[in-house]
Amino acid sequence: RYPTGLPSVDDFELRGVALPPLASGQVQVRNVWLSVDPYMRGRMNDVPSYVAPFRLDEPLDGAAVGQVVESRHDGFRPGDFVLHRFGWRDEVVADGNAFTALSSLYPPQAWLNTLGPIGATAYFGLLSVGGAKPGETVFVSAAAGAVGSVVVQIAKLKGMRVIGSAGGASKCDFVRSLGADAVIDYKAPGTMIEKLRQAAPDGIDVYFDNVGGDHLDAALGCAKQGARVAICGMIQMYNSSEVVPLANLFRVITARIRVQGFIVSDFRSRWDEFQSDMEGWVAGGKVAGHETIMEGLNVVPSAFLALFSGKNTGKLLVKL
Ligand code: NDP
């Protein structure tokens, strides 16, 4: 069923179905890594959006990495690792064209993290949408998460001053270990704007928004003249109908702030540029893919829900 507010594991059901026999041109893939992502919450509302809602009684699609079990397609052999979008299931039979063969140079799950849409979201959001430049001050929220932790690392290697926010002392320690110059524990006493003013007394040039709400309002309140706000996500709102007022919205005018939302797929035509930079950084040890791993197909709904209680550090993956 479509959930209201925070979903529960009872909104999901694990079902067994027989796979069809393998036809010519098809491959059979056994999944090894499944991705759970906050944007999937939006697909659990039956409303039109930039991506279609999930359909009731059908498997949830999304990014996954698997290994070919059997192939009747010339491009794949048993044992090959492949990326696909058939999502939350242990096995799939489909046309070979629906799968992308993965280079064996990196751990296969890296294609669901730094080398995939997570890395690209951080890269294009920070450098293109945010237009962040060396020497500038960047604030990123959910900085201990998948996208946020990559934003921190890219901003540092590009010579920016970085402030990251996260929930709790150990997550803040993690963000600091990534190279952040200052961290904000949004769960500690005090308001976001007070904490951000303290971390950035001269203001911020770029805000990479993963959270929305009071984090966004604080960023607008501390933005320098000509600052840029890259709106990537607003996880604070995904399970809530509460409207958080933006008391500092008027500063968009007075401080000439550019606020722009984006979806990573907007940058499909520039993927090679990202791939080449990111592979270099990963190979050179400048960007690391941090992971929280849960195991088993039956834990997928609770893994997904763990994103909203912040149980993950880095990319949350389910290993089968
Ligand atoms: P994360 O790995 O960052 O996981 C979500 C994190 O958000 C949690 O670990 C938690 O960290 C934090 N969080 C959860 N609820 C709240 C809350 N109410 N207030 C503040 N923080 C909260 O997920 P991703 O890196 O995959 O995604 C990060 C954001 O980027 C999301 O908003 C997502 O929708 C968006 N996104 C957008 C894309 C685009 O194309 N525009 C593409 C990919 C992601 P903590 O413990 O610190 O609270």
Image (cartoon, rainbow, N blue to C red):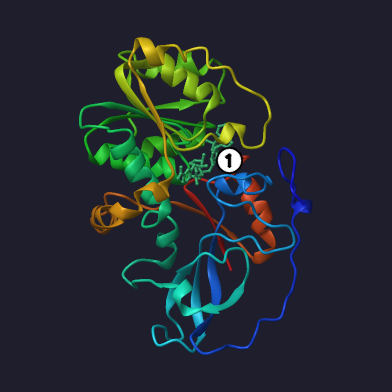
Image position, residue 166 (x, y; %):
49, 32
Q: For residue 38, what is the image quadrant?
A: top right
The residue lying toward the viewer, choosing from 53 and 243, is: 53
Q: Is residue 10 above or below residue 257?
A: below
Is disc 1's CB within 8 Å of ligand 1?
yes
Q: How many marks?
A: 1
Please report the residue visible at 57 percent of the width from the left and 18 percent of the height from the top. Answer: 189
Q: Is residue 290 above or below residue 111?
A: above
Q: Quadrant of the C terminus?
A: bottom right
Image position, residue 290 (x, y; %):
43, 51
Q: Secondary structure at mark 1?
A: loop
Furthest residue in direction front, as rendered: 48
What is the crowding at mark 1: few (fewer than 14 residues within 10 Å), some, or many (at least 20)?
some
The residue lying toward the viewer, choosing from 284 and 206, is: 206
Please report the residue visible at 55 percent of the width from the left and 24 percent of the height from the top. Answer: 213
Q: Is residue 273 above or below residue 235?
A: below
Please report the residue visible at 67 percent of the width from the left and 32 percent of the height from the top. Answer: 240
Image position, residue 3 (x, y; %):
74, 45
Image position, residue 214 (x, y; %):
53, 21
Residue hosting label 1: 310
Q: Amino acid at mark 1?
A: Gly
Please report the residue visible at 31 percent of the width from the left and 70 percent of the height from the top. Answer: 105
Q: Is residue 53 left or right of residue 103?
A: right
Residue 278 in view, yes or no? yes
Residue 178 in view, yes or no? no
Q: For residue 137, what is the image quadrant?
A: top left
